[in-house]
Image (cartoon, rainbow, N blue to C red):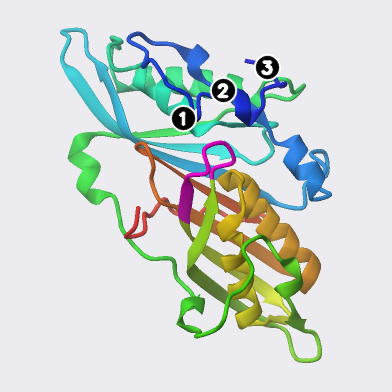
């Protein structure tokens, strides 16, 4: 693993031999810096807090007697880490646990924390820990399903003509009293920057400040349909464009993307410190 990794070098879009033994070398970190620099964001002066919230539904290992064990895993990767992890490599890494023997679920969790923390912090003079929570099968039916709360922008009947991010569609009414509101849409779609496969998502925007024009915001969200980028970078672009164009005093952007390959990635960015969103799946996940 090294910081010169590019998306084109990742396992995405290539024929893959699935590992038959535990292999942390499957993890493929990609630096956040290049995409952030394109938005005018410096890693040493982030305009947001937050994390990338991953859920994995295909995690299995063997106990000491060779019996397969199962869990759903939730991962919390802080947004200040210098790297993201390419999703197919994450899947291959998790699949490498399939024939590995672990004493118990805690041992699996400890290994996940160690490997993922090394990957996302690689190349930095800082260190930190990735959050990992494992849910045993008897807790699976407690996993909540709930749509994102807020005013539904999708109710608007309007013409959409942009296929690439168009921040000029964003505006806010600075001549009236500021508001506090939450807006949502299920029409977020972008594409994998390597394979071109579609990534479908729902997005929630919470803010205080001049009231954002809802029609322009929905058109802006739809304009990502032809955009090729990773989930994390799309959410940071949305956050940055709204912050610059609408100038809210507070802003939080949360996207929940549809699961692919047993993994979903749900980035959250906020201008003020607050608890992370509860890990609640939408109906499409």
By secondary structure, the bulk of the magenta-drawn segment is best described as loop
Q: Is residue 159 magenta?
A: no
Label 3 or label 2, whichever comes before in sequence order: 3
Q: Which residue is mark 3?
A: 2
Query: Counting other residues with Cα less than 10 Å from the Cα at mark 1, is it few (<14), some (14-19), or many (20 or more)?
Result: many
Picture residue at 49% right of the left edge, 33% below the top = 87
211 to 54, vertically: above or below: below
Picture residue at 72% right of the left edge, 84% below the top = 178
Asked if marks 1 and 2 touch (Cβ < 8 Å), the reply is yes
Picture residue at 68% right of the left edge, 59% below the top = 239
State which mark lies toward you, 1 or 3. 1
Q: Secondary structure at mark 1?
A: helix
In screen coordinates, is 114 left or right of 84? Answer: left
Magenta residue span? 192-200
Q: Secondary structure at mark 2?
A: loop
Asked if marks 1 and 3 touch (Cβ < 8 Å), the reply is no
How far, Cα to Cα, is label 1 from label 3? 17 Å
Quarter occupied by the N terminus: top right
Q: Is residue 196 magenta?
A: yes
44 to 277, vertically: above or below: above
Q: Which residue is mark 2?
A: 28
Which x, y percent locates residue 145? 31, 58
Q: Is residue 109 visible?
A: no
Which x, y percent locates residue 169? 71, 74
In the figure, residue 4 lies in which quadrant?
A: top right
How far, Cα to Cα, is label 3 from label 2? 8 Å
């Amino acid at each position: 693993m090294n910081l010169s990794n590019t998306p084109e070098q990742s396992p995405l879009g290539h024929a893959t031999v699935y590992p038959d033994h535990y292999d942390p070398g499957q993890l493929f970190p990609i630096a956040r810096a290049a995409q952030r620099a394109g938005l005018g964001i410096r890693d040493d002066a982030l305009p947001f807090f937050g994390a990338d919230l991953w859920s994995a539904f295909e995690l299995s290992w063997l106990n000491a007697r060779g019996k397969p064990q199962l869990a759903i895993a939730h991962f919390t990767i802080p947004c200040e880490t210098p790297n993201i992890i390419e999703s197919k490599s994450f899947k291959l890494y998790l699949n490498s646990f399939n024939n590995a023997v672990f004493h118990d679920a805690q041992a699996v969790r400890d290994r996940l924390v160690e490997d993922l923390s090394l990957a996302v912090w690689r190349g930095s003079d800082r260190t930190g820990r990735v959050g990992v929570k494992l849910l045993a099968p008897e807790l699976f039916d407690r996993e909540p399903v709930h749509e994102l709360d807020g005013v539904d922008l999708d109710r608007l009947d309007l013409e959409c003509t942009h296929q690439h991010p168009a921040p000029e569609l964003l505006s806010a009414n600075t001549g009236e009293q500021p508001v506090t509101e939450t807006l949502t849409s299920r029409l977020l779609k972008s594409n994998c920057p390597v394979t071109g496969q579609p990534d479908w998502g729902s997005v929630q925007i919470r803010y205080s400040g001049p009231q954002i024009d809802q029609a322009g915001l929905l058109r802006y969200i739809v304009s990502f349909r032809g955009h090729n980028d990773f989930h994390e970078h799309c959410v940071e672009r949305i956050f940055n464009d709204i912050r610059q164009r609408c100038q809210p005093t507070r802003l939080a952007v949360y996207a929940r993307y549809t699961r692919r390959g047993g993994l979903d990635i749900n980035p959250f960015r906020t201008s003020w410190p607050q608890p992370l969103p509860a890990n609640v799946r939408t109906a499409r996940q």
